[in-house]
Image: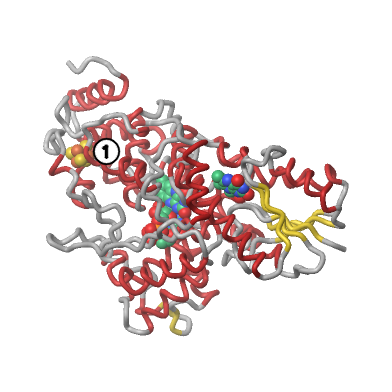
Amino acid sequence: TAALRFVLGDQLSRGLSSLADLDPENDVVLMVEVGDETTYVAHHPQKIALILSAMRHFAEELRDRGVTVDYVTLDDPDNTHSFSGELARAVKRHKPGRVVATEPGEWRVWEMMGDWESDLDLPVEILTDDRFYCTRGEFAGYVEDNKTGRMEYFYREMRRRTGLLMEGDDPAGGAWNFDQDNRKSLPKGLEPPHRMRFRPDETTQAVLDLVAGRFSDHFGDLEGFGWAVTREEALRALRHFINDILPNFGDYQDAMKTGEDYLYHALVSPYLNIGLLTPDEVCDKAEQAWKDGAAPLNAVEGFIRQILGWREFVRGIYWTEMPGYVEGNYLNARRDLPAMYWGAETDMRCMAECIGATRRNAYAHHIQRLMVTGNFALLAGVEPRQIEKWYLEVYADAFDWVELPNVHGMVMHADGGRLGSKPYAASGAYINRMSDYCKNCDYSLKQKTGREACPFNYLYWNFLIENEDKLGNNQRMGLIYGSLRKKSGAERDEITRSARAFLDGEAWD
Ligand code: FAD
Ligand code: DLZ
Ligand code: SF4
């Protein structure tokens, strides 16, 4: 019987499971632009533009291949603006025998799908999303067998399973991980290469106009939109990365530099997350570059680990821990997100740089997200829900399944250590080592407390003080709590006073 195949905005892959046995004679593909999705959080305008333009191009591609696509635009006057509402309307239009969909990337939508069969009184088939190396079921099995499963061991398992960077049973180069080579700061005079961006075509321009008209109140610039919106463009961006950038990816993975928004990062997460690229083709091409002698092992291993390891691992955590995951607040963090996250003026150079880049590009690279904006939220004790929402809104690659574990778990330690065994707290010295931000900052890195001091300095110690009951016995933090315990009562008081003045507006003296 004829199938109505519902394809969501982050499922734009030719090989998608719900399109696999499509019958072009009888089946209809449904795609919908709906208000619920464009505003469930106030997404960065570039993120909305990327998704809507990529959806429209994908629909066009399907049509070119002879597929019937029913595409509902955001300005359709009859649009009900929800997935369920639009599916119900389409069922009335097409009277299919069944509905076919691929499981979604988000718990919210997964729950919605659970109601469809009874609401529509039709068979609804929800198929596995096989664009990942590890399915939800496989990860659940892995967790069963490895209760304290950490990313590093999961990653090794995945290396063995896929054979990526393996020499027989052993990891290529004799080690699983070359991160000790991947912490170089940028040498003076090294100019990061110019990045490939894409000029909007007519379809994208129409979307940009739509987005400018409707979402101008969302945080983020739309000008300068340069994301790939088709598979062909995304493949060109990938080739550019593999050939020109990847060789340096490892060395400068943790570096940050004023005015350099991308450095040696891949800029492929939005394409992976909406389906224009698949993780296996990206990893295969990176591995090939190493085999060809075009990129060193520390770069290729580091890159593959992010995708084969971290990306798959956080997705697994999301689906095994939801829906309860989001409710945790292990460190009992309660402060509001400071206005500087939305662009309010700040003298903290590092924060201004990372937030500015985020506003311009709907992108910041990993170390900016983790060690600057993330680290600040952790040290400042921002309420997890507020900082999670921020990350979900401002990045073009942000989808609940990948954003939430990274923010809730990796950054905020709100899951009490399910994702990572200790929080990545760091003082200003770390940021100074990995960037040139501090050189241009009004705050003094050398001063540890007081109005002039780098806030990361006293916030770091204040964080350790505030959370001593929860973290003081953490073995991996033993050394640092050892130094805290050597501080005198007066020193501690000064730290606490500076932190309260900075965070809670108490008097400085
Ligand atoms: P590169 O640095 O070149 O890395 C290559 C690829 O590895 C990325 O494209 C991505 O697919 C994958 N990857 C790397 N790190 C991670 C990770 N920690 N988790 C999952 N995948 C990873 N990534 C998202 O895709 N969406 C998010 O919403 C997101 N939110 C994040 C929030 C915080 C607080 C942190 C610390 C990280 C977050 N990440 C997120 C992970 C990572 O920062 C981005 O994937 C990366 O910056 C994307 O840029 P890139 O393609 O240039 O990545
Ligand atoms: C993020 C997003 C946005 C902004 N708009 C749409 C949309 O109009 N139509 C659509 O199908 N998908 C959109 N998406 C992506 C969905 O939010 C995503 O598919 C779900 O969250 C499931 O992961
Ligand atoms: Fe950031 Fe402190 Fe460096 Fe200023 S001195 S840039 S606030 S780490």
Query: Looking at the image, can residue 335 be seen?
Result: yes
Quarter the N terminus occupies: bottom right
> Furthest-front residue in view?
202
- Residue at figure coordinates x 13%, y 35% from the top left: 444
Q: Please, what is the three-letter code of the amino acid marked with disc 1?
A: Ala
* Pointer 1 local density, CA inside 10 Å: few below 14, some 14–19, many at least 20: many
Q: Quadrant of ligand 1?
A: bottom left
Q: For this view, does 175 lie left or right of residue 152?
A: left
The answer to whether 305 is drawn above or below residue 226 in the figure is: below
Q: Is residue 410 visible?
A: no
Rendered image quadrant of residue 36: top right
In terms of depth relative to the viewer, which is nearer, 238 or 499? 238
* Closest to the observer, 331 or 52: 52
Residue ID for mark 1: 352
Q: How many marks?
A: 1
Q: Is residue 103 left or right of residue 372?
A: right
Q: Quadrant of the C terminus?
A: top left
On the image, the x and y values in percent for residue 240 come to 36, 70
- Left or right: 104 in relation to 306: right
